[in-house]
């Protein structure tokens, strides 16, 4: 679900692929919920890459900064 761009993981599906972001976060061992409530995009009932501390927004999507 990510593509490698300049050694960074870019989410391929943009900012509104909610189901794909949940599926990806489900299997991620690095997921940490962002504590800043203003940064949360979706419900916190399920982990989502959109709510991850390691997510950095870009113009069209986000990059995963987890190691």
Image (cartoon, rainbow, N blue to C red):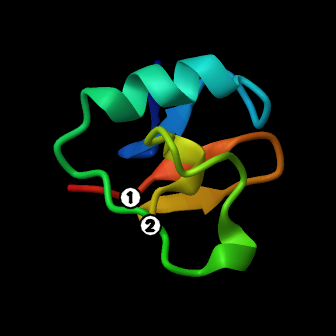
Q: Is residue 2 visible?
A: no
Element class at badge 1: loop
Residue corresponding to mark 1:
65
Q: Earlier in the sequence, mark 2 or mark 1?
A: 2
Q: Is residue 64 visible?
A: yes
Residue at left offset 64%, top offset 47%: 43
Horizontal arrangement in the rendering, residue 40 relative to residue 5 (left or right): right
Instruction: In this rendered view, identify the residue nearer to me: 55 or 58.
Output: 55
Q: Is residue 3 above or below residue 62?
A: above
Residue at left offset 76%, top offset 37%: 15
Instruction: In this rendered view, identify the residue nearer to me: 2 or 22.
Output: 22
Where is residue 65? Give x, y as percent.
Answer: 38, 58
The number of callouts visible is 2
Where is residue 57? Give x, y as percent.
Answer: 68, 58
Q: Is residue 14 above or below residue 52?
A: above
Mark 2 or mark 1, whichever is nearer to me: 2
Residue corresponding to mark 2:
53
Residue at left offset 50%, top offset 28%: 22
Instruction: In this rendered view, identify the residue nearer to me: 62 or 18.
Output: 18
Residue at left offset 79%, top offset 30%: 16
Horizontal arrangement in the rendering, residue 33 relative to residue 59 (left or right): left
């Amino acid at each position: 679900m990510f593509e490698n761009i300049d050694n960074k993981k870019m989410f391929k599906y943009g900012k509104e692929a909610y189901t794909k972001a949940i599926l990806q976060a489900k299997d991620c061992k690095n997921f940490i919920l962002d504590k800043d409530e203003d940064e949360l995009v979706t419900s916190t009932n399920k982990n989502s890459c959109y709510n991850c501390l390691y997510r950095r927004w870009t113009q069209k999507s986000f990059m995963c900064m987890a190691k």
